[in-house]
Image (cartoon, rainbow, N blue to C red):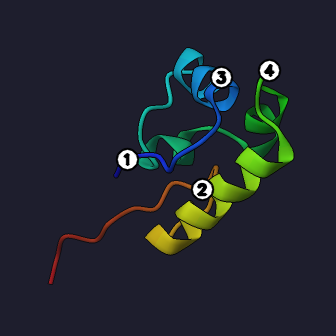
């Protein structure tokens, strides 16, 4: 899933950390994300909201159960 619209410094920070999709945010800790140069409180809030809407939390890998 695509990342939400963010300010340019936040987009650059995410790209430099190899984060290009919402799913990629499951692989980074919230503290590391917050410490990225260019990530501010507004960008973090937008990302947290987008992740919540997608059904997961930053830094917590969700395993999809494929067996039915």
Q: CA distance from mark 1 to mark 3?
A: 16 Å
Residue underneath mark 3? 13
What residue did someone put label 2 on?
A: 60
Q: Earlier in the sequence, mark 2 or mark 1?
A: 1
Which residue is nearer to you in this view: 68 or 59?
59
Residue 60 falls in which quadrant of the image?
bottom right
Task: Measure the C-alpha gap from mark 3 to mark 2.
Answer: 20 Å
Q: CA gap, disc 2 to disc 1? A: 18 Å
Sequence-earlier tag: 4 or 2: 4
CA–CA distance between discs 4 and 3?
A: 6 Å
Between circles 3 and 2, the one closer to the viewer is: 3
Q: Report x, y in % for residue 26.
A: 54, 48
Which residue shows up at 46% across the image and 49% down it? Answer: 22
Return the residue at label 1. Answer: 2
> In the image, which is nearer the foreground, mark 2 or mark 1?
1
Q: Residue furthest left?
A: 68
Question: In the structure shown, which secondary structural element does the residue marked by tag 1 occupy?
Answer: loop
Dividing the picture into quadrants, the one containing residue 67 is bottom left
Q: Earlier in the sequence, mark 1 or mark 3?
A: 1
Q: Which residue is mark 4?
A: 37
Q: Residues within 10 Å of mark 4 (few under 14, many from 20)?
A: few
* Image quarter in which the C terminus is found: bottom left
Q: Earlier in the sequence, mark 3 or mark 2?
A: 3
Callout 1: 10 Å neighbours few (<14), some, many (20+)?
few
Earlier in the chain: of badge 4 and badge 3, it is 3
Q: Is residue 60 left or right of residue 44?
A: left
Helix, strand or loop under label 3 = helix
């Amino acid at each position: 899933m695509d990342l939400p619209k963010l300010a340019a410094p936040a987009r650059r920070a995410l790209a430099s950390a190899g984060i290009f999709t919402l799913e990629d945010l499951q692989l980074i800790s919230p503290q590391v994300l917050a410490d990225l140069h260019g990530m501010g409180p507004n960008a973090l809030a937008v990302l947290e909201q987008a992740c919540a809407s997608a059904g997961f939390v930053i830094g917590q890998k969700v395993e999809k159960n494929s067996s039915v």
